[in-house]
């Protein structure tokens, strides 16, 4: 059994008992109880499903774990003024899961309204996928570094799924040290989830809510 909640900002939560393996960055340990989808996730996952069909169903996604007992599907973030989208992607990867991409694939560019009630202002999101074998861990000199102190360009977003076979994801999670850039998102560790599970929740939300709300433009 699970409970799906839609928040006012159109993000959504799936509450259930998760037995996920978590790799903690520090001493802050939490029992994860809620799977979290960013409000920027739906167009992101739709692009990937359209691109890949069922190809990813036997693979896993690397996810950040938060202090509030949630873990989020994929890496998402806001571009800073002066950054290119690809630079924002690398920064968010380093802040949230401790990786840098050697190679990535651009899946889609989407423009969509800030909410179902406010369609006059749009948000632009650029989305990516990365095979974990095409990524490399941050080094000790990168740990807790502030990459930028610029101002957020709030209507410009990036999103990414770092995916791989379960063994490859677990190999990264089991490293002796995982270093991350400094961030203010209260991320305490990383976990993994099967892509087929993500597709299931996405389909439920899409069928029940997005068609009624006419969210896409």
Image: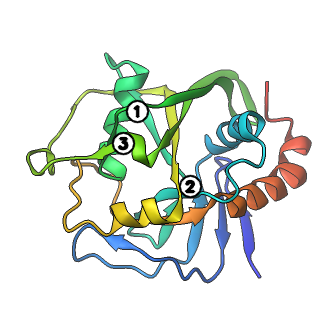
Label 2 crowding class (10 Å Cα cut-off): few <14, some 14-19, many 20+? many
Q: Earlier in the sequence, mark 3 or mark 1?
A: 1
Work out whether mark 2 precedes mark 1 in sequence or the reverse, and give the earlier one.
Answer: 2
Q: Position of residue 86 (x, y in %)?
A: 40, 24
Is residue 167 shown above or below 151?
below
Q: Nearer the viewer, residue 134 or 101?
A: 134
- Residue 113 is situated, as x and y percent measured from the top left of the image, at 69, 28
How far apart marks 3 and 1 lie (CA) works out to 12 Å
Name the residue tied to disc 3: 135
Q: Which residue is painted at 39% across and 79% down in the image?
A: 30
Discs 3/1, front: 3
Q: Which of the 4 quarters of the picture holds residue 126? A: top right
Residue 17 sits in quarter: bottom right
Tell me if I can see residue 168 in this picture.
yes
Residue 27: percent from the left, percent from the top?
A: 22, 77
Q: Residue at x 67, y 50 (%)?
A: 56
Q: Which residue is mark 1?
A: 89
95 up-or-down from 82: above or below: below
- Can the viewer see residue 64 in this picture? no
Query: Which of the labelled discs sits on residue 36, or is there none?
Result: none
Is 106 situated left or right of 7 in this image?
left
Mark 2 = which residue?
A: 73
Q: Secondary structure at mark 1?
A: helix
Eye-nearest disc, 3 or 2: 3
Up-down relation of residue 17 to residue 207 (above or below) = below
Q: Label 2, label 1: how many angstroms apart (C-alpha)?
A: 15 Å
Q: Residue at x 75, y 60 (%)?
A: 201
Disc 2 secondary structure class? loop
């Amino acid at each position: 059994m699970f409970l799906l909640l839609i928040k006012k900002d159109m993000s959504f939560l799936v509450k259930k008992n998760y037995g996920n393996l978590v790799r903690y960055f520090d001493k802050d340990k939490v029992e994860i109880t809620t799977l979290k989808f960013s409000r920027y996730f739906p167009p992101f996952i739709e692009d990937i499903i359209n691109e890949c069909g069922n190809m990813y169903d036997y693979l896993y996604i690397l996810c950040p774990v938060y202090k509030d007992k949630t873990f989020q599907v994929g890496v998402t973030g806001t571009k800073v003024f002066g950054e290119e989208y690809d630079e924002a992607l690398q920064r968010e990867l380093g802040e949230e899961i401790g990786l840098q991409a050697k190679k990535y694939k651009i899946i889609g560019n989407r423009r969509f309204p800030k909410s179902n009630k406010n369609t006059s202002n749009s948000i632009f999101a650029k989305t990516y996928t990365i095979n974990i074998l095409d990524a490399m861990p941050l080094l000790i000199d990168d740990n807790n570094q502030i990459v930028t102190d610029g101002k957020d360009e709030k209507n410009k977003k990036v999103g990414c799924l770092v995916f791989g076979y379960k063994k490859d994801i677990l190999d990264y999670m089991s490293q002796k040290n995982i270093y991350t850039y400094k961030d203010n998102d209260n991320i305490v560790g990383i976990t993994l989830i099967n892509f087929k599970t993500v597709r299931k929740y996405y389909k439920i939300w899409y069928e029940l809510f997005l068609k009624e709300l006419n969210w896409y433009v």
